[in-house]
Amino acid sequence: MSKLLLKVENLETYYGKVAALRGISFEVHEGQIVTLLGSNGAGKSTTLKTISGLIPSAAGTVTFCGEDITRKPAHDIVKRGLVQLPEGRHIFKDHTVLENLELGSYTLKDEAERKRRMESVFERFPILATRRKQLGGTLSGGEQQMLAIGRGLMSSPKLLLMDEPSMGIAPLIVRDITEIIKNLHKEGTTILLVEQNAKMALGLADYGYVMDTGSIVLEGRGSDLRRDEKVVKAYLGD
């Protein structure tokens, strides 16, 4: 078994008096793609935001690389190598592609290393290299998603949290995003993936968890969940 990278235990999160997460527990091992599935409002995005320190938890623990990060501030969690790509991309639309990427490495002091990472992003996404002086807001939806991924990679993450990477993107571009995720995985990037497109997510995932109203109701290998009658009926539509 590979090294345990992320361990979430009995995590509870509230919005006011409303329970968004009801004691969920799951694991992510190094080198895996793990997916969280569920309908809108199931708690998937809240899970990622709580892990990232963007939303405080009411109970439970989040352990990353063997260290309890449950009460750590978001900027400190990023420094430790846990990076989230938020739903809706949230690039800086009034900044250039180059400036967006530079902001992804704001914690890095080594200028040579920053340049190396930048060239690596441009090698992965040649279209961004040709648009490096273009404002982020003028890019297409697919290009903005590439920029969001590139910005996350500038932090050299040990674990990448991806929230709905295919949302609002044309079907042909979704295939490109799928290939990007596959390549990141092949290169050793560990990914926790939240994705409304269950067929895409289970085609990529080593392991998956199904969420419903803030609880995990089913789990298993990605290949097994693709054949599970409940999952097929609820999410796969075939």
Image: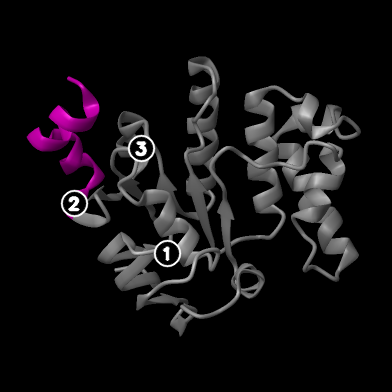
73 to the left or right of 209: right
* Residue 30, label in figure: 1
Q: Give percent across and percent down for residue 223.
A: 21, 40
The label shown at residue 144 is: none
Crowding at label 3, few (<14), some or many (≥20) Cα neighbours within 10 Å? many
Name the element at disc 1: loop
Question: According to the image, label 3 marks what residue?
Answer: 201
> Could you tell me if the residues under marks 2 and 1 are in contact, i.e. CB atoms within 8 Å?
no
Q: Residue at x 29, y 38 (%)?
A: 39
Is 110 in the magenta?
no
In the rendered view, would you say 151 is above or below 202?
below
Q: Please tell me whether mark 3 sits on a helix, a strand or a loop.
A: helix
Question: At label 3, which amino acid type do we have?
Answer: Ala
The answer to which of marks 2 and 1 sits earlier in the sequence is: 1
Q: Position of residue 4 (x, y in %)?
A: 37, 72
Q: Say whether residue 224 is magenta.
A: yes
Q: Secondary structure at mark 2?
A: strand
Q: Amino acid at mark 2?
A: Gly
Mark carried by residue 220: 2
In the foreground, 233 or 228: 233
Give the Cα separation between the discs numbered 2 and 1. Answer: 17 Å
Please identify the quadrant where the N terminus is shown. bottom left
* Label 1 Cα neighbours within 10 Å, binned few <14 / some 14-19 / many ≥20: some
Residue drawn 60% across the image and 61% down it: 157
